[in-house]
Image (spheres, helix red, strand yellow):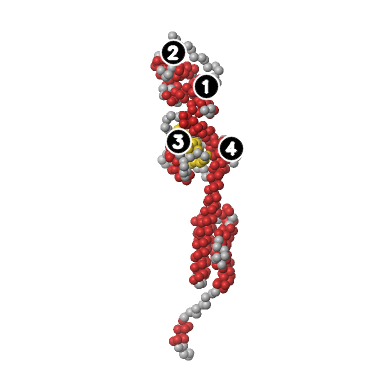
Amino acid sequence: MSTPAPPAQQEARAKPVAQKPRTKPETLAWLRTISGELSTATLKRLDDTLPWYGGMPPGRRSAVGLVAQAGISSFISWYDDPKSTPWIAADVFGAAPRELLRSVSLQQTLQLIRVVVEVVEDRVKSGSEDLREAILLYSREIAFAAADVYARAAEARGLWDARLEALVVDSILSGEYDDELPSRIAALGWHGHGAVAVLVGTTPRMLDVDVLRRAARHMTADVLIGVQGSRLVLVIGRAAPARPDSDNAEPAEPQISFMEIASGLAPHFGDGHLVLGHEVPGLVDASKSARAALAGFAVARAYRANDRPIQVDDLLPERALAGDPLARATLIHRIYQPLRNHSVELLNTLWTYLDNGRSLEATARELFVHPNTVRYRLKRISEMIGWDATGSREALILQAALILGAIQDPELPRRSEPTR
């Protein structure tokens, strides 16, 4: 039977043998030895803890794995001499293809960094305090490097989007479309559906396009923004109304009008006139609204009312006098031609009424009818074309339409001589 060891010897056996701390060269050699093990453990941890990583296609999973492995290798190099390569953390993302930045968000990248750091910390937790501190410092550098990469990518994308948007707006203003225009509009994330209208005004001294887009979104609209010197052009599209899911669902709210949208966006323009082009079916026809709005903006100073915004059809006489062919065609086709085709009697009554200074009695005497007959005819004219000849401004529009129509109508009967 053996005798028990002395108490002092028993106490010495109970104490663990203290390991001699590794030197930095020994730590570096050890890290290089386990780098492959760390990479394998990192990929397994990513698959176990991050659902978005498991759902990725194999090619992108491989790219994410390369980033993780590059991070571990970069840490070893950085730990060897942090001062000699101060930006080595940014090189971690050089192994990733460019499309990875579009498929992996900044939040997911930070989750990736956290997993890598956790794996490395678990493996080297028995190491020196200096090594653990280096891991924390390097993880901070990597996080800042990731933010810098995504910030530069976002800035480049923002500049590209601005140039692309300017190109699209210029194409709409000039009416020079090509087959690539729909894809360019889609690349800008255009959310408008159906009809569009163009709004033209002055550029404010401090234009904040983000605030302008936010204001449009609040009115369920989307805008394409073009700045041409002192002129600010918006192509406005309304978002599609929500459709009820079932027959018992409440009907969708009516769409807001373009005039209401323009009024809501008016504070984001500079001082001066604001002209809204007419509504057109879609972006393909937006150049028509743009040409009308630009022509209206050019003559808006001649409009005496203080309306803001101004509907472009309210500027038809001024635009026609300035030589706008679209305004002339609009006046003829919407006013003169319908009256001419329907009844020469109505056309003659309107012309006589305007020639006599909008006097019912003088018109009735010249036409040998009762004043009530003139009133009835003027009412029919208003119902037919939408303009009321008894108003001074609308009378000017109608007078311009009659003059332009008569210029191109060789068969128009001459005015009869008034009775003495």
Q: Amino acid at mark 3?
A: Gly
Distance between the alpha carbons at the discs numbered 4 and 3: 30 Å
User: Badge 3 is on which residue?
Assistant: 272
Residue 146 picture location, percent across and down: 52, 58
Contact between labelled residues 4 and 1, with CB atoms less than 8 Å apart: no
Residue 1 shows in this picture: yes
Q: Are marks 4 and 2 in contact (CB under 8 Å)?
A: no
Rendered image quadrant of residue 85: bottom right
Q: Does residue 341 show up? A: no
Label 2's element? helix
Against 199, is 40 above or below? below
Q: Amino acid at mark 4?
A: Tyr
| Amino acid found under the numbered disc labelled 2 | Glu
Q: Quadrant of the C terminus?
A: top left
What crowding class fits label 1: few (fewer than 14 Cα within 10 Å), some (14-19), or many (20 or more)?
A: many
Q: CA distance from mark 1 to mark 4?
A: 32 Å
Secondary structure, mark 3, is loop
Q: Are marks 2 and 3 in contact (CB under 8 Å)?
A: no
Q: Which mark is residue 198?
A: none
Closer to us: 348 or 291: 291
Residue placed under numbered mark 2 in the picture: 366
Mark 4 lies on a secondary structure that is loop
Q: What is the three-letter code of the residue carrying label 1?
A: Gly
